[in-house]
Amino acid sequence: MTRNRPRIIDLSVSIGSDVMDPLPFAIRYESHEEGVHLGAKLFGVVPEAFQEGKGLAGEFLELTTHAGTHVDAPWHYWPTSEGKPARTIDELPLDWFYNDGIVLDFTDKPAGYEISSNDLMMKLDSIGYELKPFDIVMIRTDCDKKIYDPAYAQSHPGVSAEATLWLIDQGIKVMGIDAWGWDIPLKYQAEDYKRNPRDGVLWAAHFAGKEKEYCQIEKLANLDQLPATGFKVSVFPVKIHRASAGWARAVAILN
């Protein structure tokens, strides 16, 4: 008997040097011919001991935990959250990262637009959905299609601190976006601050984590391939000791 298999959609971007991400990154590829020397050292033999003088291929990366699709931990936002030491990525409960997924389509909003809680409520009303605790809410901008564009990091609408706190109040612990950042692009934040220098402008949505604990997924992809509701999301972060984030192979699972 053939069992129906779920459809799995990749929600992750690749980590690579050709991606237009302003964060520092380097990758060195080691060929099979180069890998034989490491193999010889590990085994304590000469390279000629290996078949046709070939070892194992490998890669060496220098990158931040915020490269590629990743989950930000509360520690990323501030040393404390809800008056307690902020948790790092290895301290968070795994059941946060596998739950029902919700896609809210904001592809009609321009770069620099700041999504409010009222925007979220209207969008939820339009799809006839009421949030429940631990849903994974994902903001669709389609900016993942611009990941090789030099303007990628400055191309998206973002989420306000007020809207972020509203989501947390609905019981949402994990929320994400298919763009470089959860907040509006840096240039719009900087322009606002320079016009009127004050607290609460730069990375405002991130700093909402000081008040209430939550995680955000940045640099999601392929949200255009999903329905608004009716699927599961798996976004388990890599367990990095005391880290502010962990890379994730985010996927949607549709039965």
Image (cartoon, rainbow, N blue to C red):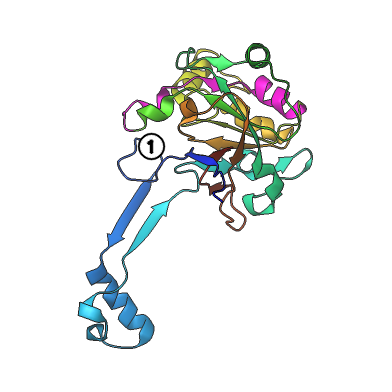
**SS for callout 1:** loop
Read off the residue under disc 1. Answer: 21
User: Is residue 74 in sight in this rendering?
Assistant: no
The magenta stretch is 148-169
Question: Which quadrant holds the C terminus?
Answer: top right
- Pick the residue in front: 150 or 228: 228
For image coordinates 57% across by 48% down, the residue present is 3
* 182 vs 121: above or below: below
* 143 vs 115: above or below: below
* 199 vs 119: above or below: below
Q: Position of residue 206 (x, y in %)?
A: 61, 32
Q: Position of residue 221 (x, y in %)?
A: 46, 33
Q: Residues within 10 Å of mark 1 (few under 14, many from 20)?
A: many
How many marks on residues?
A: 1
Q: Quadrant of residue 137?
A: top right
For image coordinates 74% across by 33% down, the residue present is 212
Q: Position of residue 114 (x, y in %)?
A: 56, 16
For image coordinates 38% across by 45% down, the residue present is 24
- Taking the view exactly as shown, the residue that stands out farthest to the bottom is 45
- Pick the residue in front: 33 or 253: 253
- Pick the residue in front: 101 or 152: 101
- Taking the view exactly as shown, the residue that stands out farthest to the right is 83
Kind of residue indicated by mark 1: Asp
Q: Quadrant of residue 36?
A: bottom left
User: Is residue 180 in sight in this rendering?
Assistant: yes
Q: Quadrant of residue 139?
A: top right
Compared across the picture, whether 42 is left or right of 210 comes to left
